[in-house]
């Protein structure tokens, strides 16, 4: 079978949902796929717009599926948003954040103080991600801050979130409430912005040309990989279809049935 992987590629930055698994179902024989990646001498990192879990939680999930990775290899949109905020506020400071464990942990690790609803008016920035405990008070405080001109950041623009029962509101759906109420949109950390991929590539220590960004969604993974200046591979095991990939511009470098076929 022909080798789909360009010979000079030294590292892979993999998306997770739709590439490694669909909800809880692994896509292919993951231990065998990662043995193959190791045998080819490729470095690996993961970049996901899903910021609900921490890198440690993702590493644990992969371990349960028979794949050993270190938490540093996993870059989530929660980590990305905390990183972006650190660039703007290097000495930390008070933040009003709406989000899950992933977002809160990443912000705390970067030295930010997370404000309660009562203290929200003291915030120097607003951060939004998916929050299973979302309520009116949180949305009200975020709206008041953004209307006041406080910088507004968000993990990812994905409007929905796939679950076994169907698609449920994702970060983008909640962010739309604030955008409607304020007329102001956030700065997004997640793909198609290049930040997560830049962080991953820095950690891997490979050049843009040596790095292949792999994902299942054209608008986020492929657009993001191209924005980051890397080569891109679409796998057809998730959201995007072959016909859409063939008309994507700039051209997708590699199209593969799934991750197993890509690294074969
Ligand atoms: Mg995906």
Image (spheres, rainbow, N blue to C red):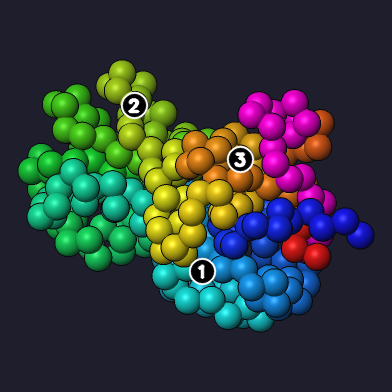
Classify 146 as above or below 66: above
Please tell me which of labels 3 and 1 falls first in the chain: 1
The mark found on residue 185 in the picture is: 2
Contact between labelled residues 1 and 3, with CB atoms less than 8 Å apart: no
Q: Is residue 23 magenta?
A: no
**Along the horizontal axis of the image, is 218 left or right of 91?**
right
Ligand 1 closer than 8 Å to the CB at disc 2?
no
Question: Of helix, strand and loop, which one carries label 2?
Answer: loop
At 33% from the left edge and 34% from the top edge, which residue is drawn? 187
Residue at image mark 1: 58
Q: Along the line of sight, which residue is nearer the eye, 63 or 233? A: 233
The mark found on residue 222 in the picture is: 3
Quadrant of residue 190 within the rendered picture: top left
Question: Of helix, strand and loop, which one carries label 1?
Answer: helix
At 40% from the left edge and 46% from the top edge, which residue is drawn? 195
**At which x and y percent is residue 152?**
26, 35
At 80% from the left edge and 65% from the top edge, which residue is drawn? 264
Quadrant into which the N terminus falls: bottom right
Q: CA distance from mark 2 to mark 3?
A: 23 Å
Number of other residues with Cα within 10 Å of mark 1, as a class: few under 14, some 14 to 19, many 20 or more = some
Contact between labelled residues 3 and 2, with CB atoms less than 8 Å apart: no
Q: Nearer the viewer, mark 2 or mark 3?
A: 3
Q: Is residue 251 magenta?
A: yes
Q: Which residues are magenta?
A: 244-261
């Amino acid at each position: 079978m022909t080798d789909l992987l360009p010979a000079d590629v030294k590292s892979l930055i993999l998306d997770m949902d739709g590439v490694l698994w669909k909800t809880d179902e692994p896509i292919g024989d993951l231990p065998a796929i990662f043995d193959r990646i190791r045998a080819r001498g490729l470095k690996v990192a993961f970049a996901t717009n899903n910021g609900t879990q921490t890198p440690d939680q993702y590493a644990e999930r992969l371990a349960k599926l028979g794949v050993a990775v270190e938490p540093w290899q996993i870059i989530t949109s929660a980590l990305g948003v905390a990183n972006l905020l650190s660039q703007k506020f290097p000495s930390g400071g008070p933040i009003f954040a709406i989000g899950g464990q992933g977002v809160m942990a990443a912000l705390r690790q970067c030295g930010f103080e997370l404000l309660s609803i009562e203290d929200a008016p003291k915030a120097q920035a607003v951060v939004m991600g998916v929050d299973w405990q979302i309520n009116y008070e949180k949305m009200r405080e975020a709206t008041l801050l953004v209307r006041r001109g406080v910088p507004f950041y968000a993990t990812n623009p994905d409007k929905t979130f796939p679950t076994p029962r169907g698609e449920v509101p994702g970060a983008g759906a909640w962010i739309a409430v604030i955008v409607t109420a304020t007329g102001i949109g956030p700065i997004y950390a997640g793909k198609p912005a290049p930040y997560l991929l830049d962080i991953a590539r820095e950690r891997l220590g490979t050049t843009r040309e040596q790095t292949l960004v792999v994902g299942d969604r054209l608008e986020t993974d492929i657009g993001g990989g191209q924005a980051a200046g890397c080569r891109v591979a679409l796998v057809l095991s998730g959201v995007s279809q072959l016909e859409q990939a063939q008309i994507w511009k700039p051209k997708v470098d590699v199209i593969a049935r799934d991750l197993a076929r890509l690294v074969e």
